[in-house]
């Protein structure tokens, strides 16, 4: 029972990090174009994430049943997977990289599962068809949708007075940002719900075919909303100011395209990464706008981070499981939880040397910023 | 003589992926186009050089497009909730 409670607590911590890590997906364009003040945008996003978490459970079912052999899953495996995902999330947050929390979670669980039972415990076909191929396609689909959308918007409003256009799209961005926040809550909170459900099944509290209990839905919704409210300002700055200079028209098109992709995929039960979709859309609107420079070096760095996210989180999950198992029992899990807490505290302390918050989130990224090389800026 | 045939599930569900791509692009582009048309209509409606008839028709377009956007969002959410 103690072990189950620890796993659920760690799952909610992961959900919290998912919230602040992914706030940028929904609000970065809104903040970057000045459509809403940073704090207002984040608060609105937080409330709508809470609402969105109650709308659908299709992705939760996918996480719980399509990626690993449920009958082999143990609580320490889930714990180790979550620790791997949390550590990777916080590390990428420190470096201001918009990586996928979903892939970190999936990678962490699979890494721990590989140590426990080997390759046969992982449903590789499910992993490829439900995660890897959609992950490759998500940014491309979003890029195309956003690129076509912003081109259409530009042509249709070419004769509209600039002031009216800017004001109109800024107002529109409040709606599109809200829709995207709702979509994020719908899509992402479910992943933690799926993991908690898996833990309850592994513990024997729920039967294998049981649906997600209401208290799990409520707890996950609140955790992701609180995380969102904290605001992952470092990543918001990367997405809003890093890739290119976003105009309200571009921000609106990017957010609507992202919402459409995420809501559609969520409706059809595909666990698409909101980070990949939102990044693809933002890059897409820059790419489709003539004479609009895009920082391709940063895009490449982010894409590289996406590729290594699952293996890196998997490695962390595997190491966490190995040592928890080596120490043994609930005590091993407690020790690993403390080690993870110390790691998070160190990262938090390091982040204080270069604070990004609601006040400086719209500052242009410095040329010395390690994640951006302005010399490589090329015209799209 | 009866025979049985086992059909393996496809490794990648291409029809589902194709459906996601097509639906996303149609909805995403459709909403942005609808909003842009509404904005252009609003701009015409605000123009001082336009005739009364043009301003009225532009306002009508704006209202209709706005209603269409709201209706499509509500429809999308209802669809998700029912699933």
Image (spheres, rainbow, N blue to C red):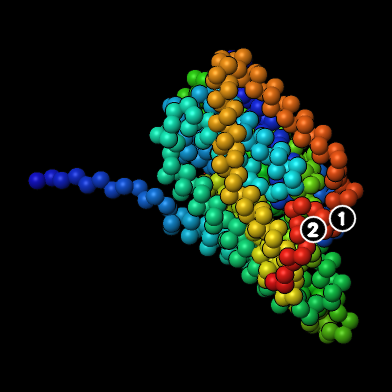
**Image point (84%, 66%), residue name:** A167
From where the camera sits, is residue A332 visible?
Answer: yes
From where the camera sits, is residue A23 visible?
Answer: no
**Image point (78%, 80%), residue name:** A159
- Looking at the image, is A14 positioned above or below residue A261? above
- SS assignment at label 2: helix
| Nearer-N-terminus badge (1/2) | 2
Other residues around mark 2 within 10 Å, as few (<14) / some (14–19) / many (≥20) = many
| Residue in the foreground of this view, choosing between A126 and A27 | A126
**Image point (53%, 34%), residue name:** A111
Specify the subunit that label 2 lies on.
A
- Looking at the image, is A45 positioned above or below residue A8? below
Quadrant of the drawing holding the C terminus of chain A: bottom right
Specify the subunit that label 1 lies on.
A
Which disc number belongs to residue A363? 1
Quarter occupied by residue A193: top right
Q: Measured from the top left, where is residue A244 in percent x and y?
A: 76, 63
Query: Are the numbered discs 1 and 2 placed on the same chain, yes or no?
Result: yes
| Image-based side of A71 in relation to A105, left or right | left
- Looking at the image, is A212 positioned above or below residue A244? above
Residue occupied by mark 2? A241
| Image-based side of B63 in relation to A10, left or right | right
Quadrant of the drawing holding the N terminus of chain A: top right
- Looking at the image, is A38 positioned above or below residue B63? above
Q: Measured from the top left, where is residue A65 in percent x and y?
A: 47, 36
Distance (Cα) linking label 1 and label 2: 8 Å
Disc 1 vs disc 2: Cβ atoms closer than 8 Å?
yes
């Amino acid at each position: 029972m103690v072990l189950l409670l620890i796993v659920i607590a760690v799952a909610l911590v992961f959900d919290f990090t998912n919230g602040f890590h992914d706030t940028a997906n929904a609000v970065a364009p809104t903040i970057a174009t000045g459509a809403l003040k940073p704090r207002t945008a984040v608060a609105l996003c937080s409330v709508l994430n809470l609402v969105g978490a109650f709308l659908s459970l299709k992705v939760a079912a996918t996480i719980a049943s399509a990626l690993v052999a449920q009958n082999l899953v143990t609580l320490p495996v889930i714990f180790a997977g979550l620790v791997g995902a949390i550590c990777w999330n916080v590390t990428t947050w420190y470096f201001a990289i918009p990586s996928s929390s979903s892939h970190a979670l999936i990678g962490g669980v699979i890494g721990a599962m590989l140590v426990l039972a080997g390759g046969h415990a992982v449903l590789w076909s499910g992993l490829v068809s439900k995660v890897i191929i959609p992950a490759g396609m998500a940014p491309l689909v979003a890029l195309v949708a956003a690129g076509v959308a912003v081109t259409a918007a530009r042509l249709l409003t070419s004769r509209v007075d600039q002031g009216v256009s800017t004001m109109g799209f800024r107002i529109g961005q409040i709606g599109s940002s809200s829709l995207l926040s709702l979509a994020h809550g719908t899509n992402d909170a479910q992943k933690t719900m799926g993991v908690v459900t898996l833990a309850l099944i592994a513990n024997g509290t729920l039967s294998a075919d049981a649906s997600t209990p209401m208290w799990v839905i409520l707890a996950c919704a609140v955790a992701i909303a609180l995380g969102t409210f904290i605001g992952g300002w470092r990543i918001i700055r990367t997405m809003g100011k890093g890739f290119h200079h976003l105009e309200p028209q571009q921000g609106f098109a990017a957010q609507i395209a992202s919402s459409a992709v995420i809501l559609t995929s969520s409706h059809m039960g595909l666990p698409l990464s909101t980070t990949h979709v939102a990044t693809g859309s933002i890059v897409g609107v820059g790419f489709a706008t003539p004479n609009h420079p895009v920082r391709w070096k940063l895009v490449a760095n982010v894409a590289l981070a996406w590729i290594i996210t699952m293996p890196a989180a998997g490695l962390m999950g595997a190491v966490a499981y190995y040592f928890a198992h080596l120490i043994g029992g609930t005590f091993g899990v407690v020790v690993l939880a403390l080690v993870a807490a110390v790691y998070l505290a160190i990262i938090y302390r390091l982040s204080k040397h270069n604070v990004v918050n609601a006040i400086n989130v719209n500052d242009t990224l410095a040329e010395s910023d390690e994640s951006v090389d302005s010399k490589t800026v090329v015209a799209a | 003589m009866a025979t049985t045939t086992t059909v393996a599930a496809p490794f990648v569900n291409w029809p589902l992926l194709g459906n996601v791509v097509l639906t996303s692009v149609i909805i995403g582009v459709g909403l942005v186009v609808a909003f842009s048309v509404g904005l252009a209509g609003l701009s015409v409606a605000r123009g001082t050089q336009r005739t009364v008839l043009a301003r009225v028709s532009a306002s009508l377009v704006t209202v209709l497009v706005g209603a269409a956007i709201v209706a499509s969002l509500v429809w999308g959410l209802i669809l998700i909730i029912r699933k």
